[in-house]
Image (cartoon, rainbow, N blue to C red):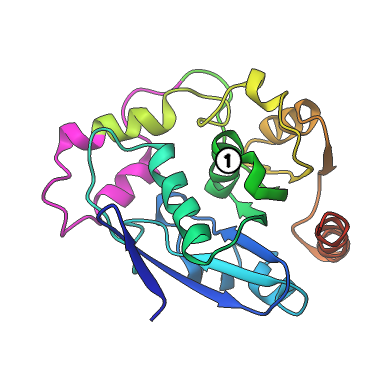
């Protein structure tokens, strides 16, 4: 099975197709695993859609319920995931790639653009997560659902999980970065809008307005709008392929 270890973490990934690489980040929050790409919650499945033209790389995020695993500490946050993503690229000897991420994948993309923009040719953010307004008291329900699945992580004490949750979600906006950073991004981006509490439309719209080089698709999940979005995403990726 395609997996490797780095800094104590075991990362599982898959590759489909050939051509210029696309590193993908599946939806489902902290339970982001490859299998989610085949579910109805992912209207555009990059493995199915783009592996005829591109080398599509998918991965299980650490401790998401799949085959990637790492110790959980109070210092973990967005940079922990970004280190895994860069390790995948390094392991596969990929200098530059496209990124496609849905849901939490939007924040994974933005943090990677912050840490290593030279590695990214273009990025597609589908219904990115974010928060409008202050953080509600306590941990989010989705975080608790993930935490309840950590049956083999005795190090994940309530105190550690509280710290991890704050590291991920306390900042607001897109969680991993602020608006001033987004204004500086030079990478061509495309945003496919969200439309619910976890993926607020105003966050998608503001991201699209702040990103200097961005295409915005406000409707894309069903019917003719979905077919049109599939074509636009493919065209966007092809346009920005070196």
Where, quadrant-wise, is the C terminus in this rendering?
Answer: bottom right
- SS assignment at label 1: loop
For disc 1, the marked residue is: 116
Task: Please tell me in which quadrant of the rendered image residue 31 appears.
Answer: bottom left
Task: Please tell me in which quadrant of the rendered image residue 234 appears.
Answer: bottom right
Which residue shows up at 24% across the image and 37% down it? Answer: 161
User: Position of 53 compared to 133: left or right?
Assistant: right
The image shows residue 153, relative to residue 92, as above or below, that is: above
Which residue shows up at 48% across the image and 53% down it? Answer: 85
> Callout 1: 10 Å neighbours few (<14), some, many (20+)?
few
> Is-magenta flag for residue 136?
yes
Q: Nearer the viewer, residue 151 or 56?
A: 56
Q: Nearer the viewer, residue 198 or 177?
A: 177
Task: Please tell me in which quadrant of the rendered image residue 70 appears.
Answer: bottom left
Q: Which residues are magenta?
A: 135-161
Where, quadrant-wise, is the N terminus in this rendering?
Answer: bottom left
Residue 71, visible in the rendered structure = yes
User: Position of 179 compared to 177: left or right?
Assistant: right
Rendering coords of residue 44 (x, y %): 70, 64
User: Position of 161 compared to 221: left or right?
Assistant: left
Q: Nearer the viewer, residue 145 or 99?
A: 99
Rendering coords of residue 195 (x, y %): 68, 42
Which residue shows up at 49% across the image and 68% down it? Answer: 34
């Amino acid at each position: 099975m395609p997996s490797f270890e780095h800094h104590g973490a075991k990362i599982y990934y898959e590759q489909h197709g050939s051509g210029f690489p696309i590193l993908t980040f599946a939806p489902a929050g902290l339970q982001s695993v490859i299998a989610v790409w085949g579910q109805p919650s992912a209207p555009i499945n990059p493995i199915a859609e783009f592996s005829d033209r591109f080398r599509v790389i998918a991965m299980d995020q650490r401790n998401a319920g799949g085959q990637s695993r790492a110790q959980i500490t109070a210092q973990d946050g967005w940079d922990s995931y970004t280190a895994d993503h860069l390790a995948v690229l390094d392991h596969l000897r990929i200098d530059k790639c496209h990124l496609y991420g849905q849901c939490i994948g939007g924040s994974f993309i933005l943090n990677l653009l912050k840490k290593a923009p030279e590695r990214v040719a273009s990025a597609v953010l589908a219904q990115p997560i974010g928060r409008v307004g202050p953080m509600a008291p306590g941990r989010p329900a989705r975080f608790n659902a993930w935490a309840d699945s950590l049956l083999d992580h005795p190090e994940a004490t309530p105190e550690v999980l509280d710290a991890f949750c704050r590291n991920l979600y306390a900042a607001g906006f897109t969680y991993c970065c602020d608006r001033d950073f987004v204004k500086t991004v030079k990478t061509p981006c495309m945003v496919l809008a969200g439309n619910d509490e976890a993926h607020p439309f105003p966050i998608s719209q503001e991201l699209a307005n702040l990103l200097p080089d961005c295409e915005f698709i406000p409707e894309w999940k069903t019917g003719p709008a979905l077919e049109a979005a599939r074509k636009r995403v493919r065209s966007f990726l092809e346009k920005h392929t070196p």
